[in-house]
Image (cartoon, rainbow, N blue to C red):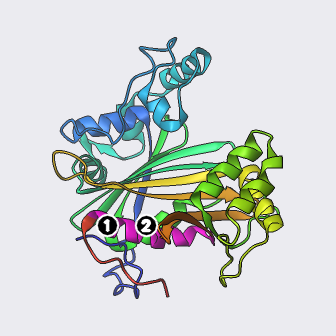
Amino acid sequence: MPTIDLGPPRPGPRDLLDGLPRRVSLTLPELRYAAEAAGGAPLPFDLVDLVDRAGGGDSVLAARLGGAVDADDAAAYAAALARLAAPVDTLTRRGLLVAGELDRGILGAVGLLATPRFALDLDVVAGGVQARCWHRQSAGAVASLATADGLVFELAWFPTWAWADELSRVAVIPEDLPLTESRVPGFVDLPHELADAGVEAVRSHRADLLPVLAAQHRGRVTDETGDVLTDLEVGTVLTALASEPQGRLRAMVADVSGAAAATVGVVAWTLVGDGWRALRPHGVDERLHVEVRRVIPEDLAADLAPVLAVVTGARPPGPRG
């Protein structure tokens, strides 16, 4: 059963390039050509060609990348897609298509995308940029596909033991996104009901309700040492959780080897003023709580390991280090 390997490094490769992840950028026409060359392999998203629906804004791909688009956005997407060169020409110029034969690595990666055992879908928003990533794993190998605009995609393939490092790339915060101090502590544990109601109150301009909500859950909000936060501190945390986020990360894992996907596990992060916070639900005295904890991109694999263990039935690997 596959795991994200967080243990000691594997033995050195036989040569400099052995085992290293390979990446290639492909335009949407090139990607579709590769899928056809791989025996008509389905892509990991439902593709609707906007060229045929330029005025309707009705595209499953657009929805997967961030919701419905209006007619102007659809027309702009269709125009940009139409300007892309023919895939045979561009792939040939790049040395990826030789004598009618597509690069075998690309064929294998596209094939793995179509026939995985485990699927990991990631939706990442940071500032005004949204990206979708699809990771597919089977038989000790992983293929990934990522895009921020639905026009250019990064296709990568690598061994399963390198998955942890590849996942950390997904959560890297853009360099041009300014980070500041945050009023969200590095750790806080609070009832899910309080977090939900408090964030909604702030977003609805009813911050006056925060003292009432905090009083209703007094004694149930704690820091990392187990100390209870005051009502004033709780109000500050709720206000920050509602007003600071400038991004999110959502990862969904499933076993797709059967006729229907197995139980799906979910990991969620939010991007606040000074970086990522993981949102980890758990039970406390038969109540649903959420742990808000500071994390860095390299922690994504560790957060996903228990989720993969639930889906695969495997024991999650030990902590990093």
Q: What secondary structure is the stretch in magenta mostly built from?
A: helix
User: Is residue 181 in view from this perspective?
Assistant: no
Front residue of 318/202: it is: 202
Residue 308 magenta-drawn? yes
At 37% from the left edge and 77% from the top edge, which residue is drawn? 5
Q: Which residue bears the numbered disc 1?
A: 310
Mark 1 or 2, nearer chain start = 2
At 32% from the left edge and 70% from the top edge, which residue is drawn? 309
Span colored in magenta: 293-311
Q: Where is residue 317 in the image (x, y as percent from the top left)?
A: 37, 80
Q: Which amino acid does label 1 sit on?
A: Val
**Count of numbered labels shown in the rendering:** 2
Q: Where is residue 150 in the image (x, y as percent from the top left)?
A: 49, 35
Q: In this view, does 310 lie to the left or right of 58?
A: left
User: Is residue 286 in view from this perspective?
Assistant: yes
Q: Which residue bears the numbered disc 2?
A: 304
